[in-house]
Image (cartoon, coloured by chain):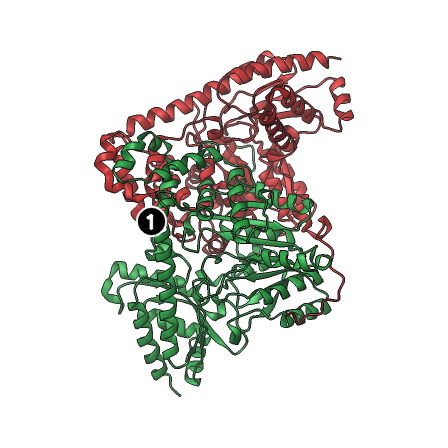
Chain colours: A green, B red
Amino acid sequence: MTKLDLNFEPAEQLDLKDLNEHVLKAEYAIRGAIPMRAEQIQDQINLDPESVPFDKITTANIGNPQQLQQKPLTYSRQVVSVLQYPELLQHRDLLVKSGAYMPDALDRAKILLDKIGGSVGAYSSSQGVRGIRDTVAEYITRRDDGEPASPQDIFMTDGATRAVTYLLSLLCRGPQYGVLIPIPQYPVYTASLTLYNTAAIPYYLNEKSGWSTDAEEIEIQIKKTIAKGIKPSVIVVINPGNPTGSLLKPDVMEDIVTLAAKYGLVILADEVYQENVFSEGRKFYSFKSVLRSLQRRHKIIYDNVQLASIHSTSKGVFGECGQRGGYLELIGFRNSVREEILKLASLSICAVITGQAMVDLMVAPPTKGQPSYEMDKAERLAIHNTLKERGELLYNTFQELEGIECQRPQGAMYLFPRLYFSQKVYDAAKKADLQPDEFYCHALLESTGICVVPGTGFGQEEGTWHLRTTFLAPGTEWIQKWKAFHQDFYKKYAD
Amino acid sequence: MTKLDLNFEPAEQLDLKDLNEHVLKAEYAIRGAIPMRAEQIQDQINLDPESVPFDKITTANIGNPQQLQQKPLTYSRQVVSVLQYPELLQHRDLLVKSGAYMPDALDRAKILLDKIGGSVGAYSSSQGVRGIRDTVAEYITRRDDGEPASPQDIFMTDGATRAVTYLLSLLCRGPQYGVLIPIPQYPVYTASLTLYNTAAIPYYLNEKSGWSTDAEEIEIQIKKTIAKGIKPSVIVVINPGNPTGSLLKPDVMEDIVTLAAKYGLVILADEVYQENVFSEGRKFYSFKSVLRSLQRRHKIIYDNVQLASIHSTSKGVFGECGQRGGYLELIGFRNSVREEILKLASLSICAVITGQAMVDLMVAPPTKGQPSYEMDKAERLAIHNTLKERGELLYNTFQELEGIECQRPQGAMYLFPRLYFSQKVYDAAKKADLQPDEFYCHALLESTGICVVPGTGFGQEEGTWHLRTTFLAPGTEWIQKWKAFHQDFYKKYAD
């Protein structure tokens, strides 16, 4: 029996006014209004397939390769299945003879299990499994042509997003501080900054030069911000670009490092698309390699630059989004600052162990001479080529159409074409209480089932309109349907 | 060639003063000074086994069952290995005949793969896989004797910690708001509140009544807080208790629900130890079942109560910490508030898919008549009984010793004994610049390799001293070693 007085007026339920205002303000377009409408339509198709003029939703709004039938790499999945069920190792002969497993996949699983300490069901240290961090450090060293990397600087994370959260929650200190973000940008950055109540300082990417960064434009923004009494503390660079599909050249990257040295900006290098490079003759340069090269040439100036680089299993030829594997490399930070990142990681206890294992497998595929080598290489190449070809096809299709202008795909898995609209589109959009790019994307979805994200969700220069599409969806039929829709739309709304 | 002026003074590196002050202030004892010292000792043992008077560290500081040789449940691991490598389904006959797999595990994997959409490498919706949320809702309904649960109210999360983060980041609004937390408590709560700059309002658990909650004590704290101009908005209850190992009775839970109704508190029910119930004749009651029962009896008073219940695959007989599976059930919240939780989830994109699958397997084990049923049941029972017996043994050992007083283990996987120290201990601790409980725990670690967490890390009534130990470590030898250490310690420091 309660000792409390039951004679009271029950309190009000929570309402939006009772919540953290910064959460309320945060917006995330990739899973916003149009994708939500697409989900509704999918439910409708499931109930009554005849109710819409297409048979399925084509989800080109999100970089989710395996949802779109990109096959996982066989070797890595063989290894991780054994991590989940090590008893498989007791059946080695049978599994190899039957062709169910490659022998080197079983060997690798054994090595990984030892690194992990025997079970993927146990927590690892908060920084991540040491042996896996060793593998990552070796990968970075190879990738950067011998520039050394240390496992002490590597933090394993649940996808790249978690790494962004650690960094921004540590470096964001309130509205009198600012983070430079590219426009257009991946909206998790603006959303996080809103959440952490810190100013987003936009710097515009240069569409005409393939969405490259422009150091002079960035420095103008920095000076303007400082003049307003706001201290810029971080610069976010996404390379290869999301949503733009750009690939930065080392000289423009050098300029960004110079700005970081001059203004004490931490460089947050979002390098999750480092394997997705499609331009002939071009290669991915990491910010770390650019920094090290500058440090060799001008030690005094660049010695204090602080760089955080993030990578993930979600993109590249791996496409293992749902496995939530990722890592963060910290370069040039004081130990005391690193300790704080470790504290934040320890509050999440540890990154999922199979995701950590996936990172190990991503950065150290089977090597020449191992039984799985040829199969793995062929699978990787096939995925890479399919993406490249489909990106080109989509680009070429846009080239043929009026009212749309697109940069050639260089990297990542996106195109971010610009749309030119007639007055009629502006009027119709206004009537529908939508921006013109939203209006176009809604119409595309309702007519064809193709779901893309309007440029509004990523930011764009005022008066310009864009959309972001992935080129992951299988086949080419959807591209033809889009083409037909586009032509009809422009005919319908011709001035 | 850069267009930027290289003639500048390089900026300073970041220092602690440049970081978010709330991160700096946050503390997390479970991975704090003593566990860090234990890691150092482990490294030392690896280099020179003779350098310490024991052969290994016994990690009793953290609830990490599989690190301590608790075996994962075979059925669930069989299923998840197939999710990682669905090609195994092509070898069904071989796998079943050889005894590598149970046929119903293969069938379950097929069903789960369909629910997931074909690949654990694809993102799910941010709320989680619908079919898995259905299974969770069915489980809750069974657990609560038919009180209905809806998949719409279930959010899949990376472990329970992520659910805590979503809730507190939404409900914490600054220092003029407060969250009631039990003392002693699981320190992720105080750390999160420091991070979100919101007041922690301690309410003391009653050690003498087996660490139960005391509604009158809580109401006093609420009134004091309101008088200070701080609005309490959430009450955290951990049941079964961490670090206390308590199990709440329905009547004291009713009182907490009444306080929630009266003061408009959201109940954050940390129910991750719901399977870990060891008291004879006692059972776990969920806060939801208590709330529903009150609502039936006094609808007007209790209709507006808002409850968030969290659960995880990390504890119970599953012990799958490293898989990061968990869920959150929201009860009684307005839709608009739920939408904000969904937005926070969408910023993390989605919970790891294999973790979601683990939740499905945890809440819906094989049923009677299925080939795996007897094996699975026997494995679950063996783990449960081992934990129960070891908890009892540790408790009985403490009963024999002077200077230590312990409540009988009722639930969870912890004991939180009280320590009484002589003046000599106080003096020695002061000299070492430690609290007395820290001093004892350091001495225990250095003498025996047993790593536990001092009560200071969880909070305790002023002038009282405790420690938290798990009873997960295998065998009983460590308990005997602890006993011998304790006797020596009390002899050495006798007044």
Residue ID at (55%, 66%):
A249
Instruction: Return the residue nearer the eye: B267 or A446.
Output: A446
The quarter of the displayed image where residue B101 is located: top left
Instruction: Return the residue nearer the eye: B285 or A344.
Output: A344
The quarter of the displayed image where residue A380 is located: bottom left
Mark 1 surroundings within 10 Å by alpha-carbon count, few (fewer than 14), some (14 through 19), many (20 or more) = some
Of all residues, the one furthest to the front in this rendering is A369
Residue A431 point in image, percent of width and height: 43, 79
The answer to whether residue B446 of the structure is visible from this angle is yes
In the displayed structure, would residue A329 be above or below residue A3? below
In the displayed structure, would residue A256 be above or below residue A461? above
Residue A171 point in image, percent of width and height: 65, 54
Residue ID at (43%, 62%):
A413
In the displayed structure, would residue B282 be above or below residue A14? above
The answer to whether residue B464 of the structure is visible from this angle is no
**SS category of the residue bearing label 1:** helix
Residue B196 in the figure: left or right of residue B74: right
Q: How many labels, in total?
A: 1
Amino acid at dot 1: Met
Residue B271 point in image, percent of width and height: 48, 36
In the rendered image, which quarter contains the C terminus of chain A?
bottom left
Residue B203 point in image, percent of width and height: 62, 35
Residue indicated by mark 1: A375
Residue B131 in the figure: left or right of residue B206: left
Q: Which chain letter goes with mark 1?
A: A
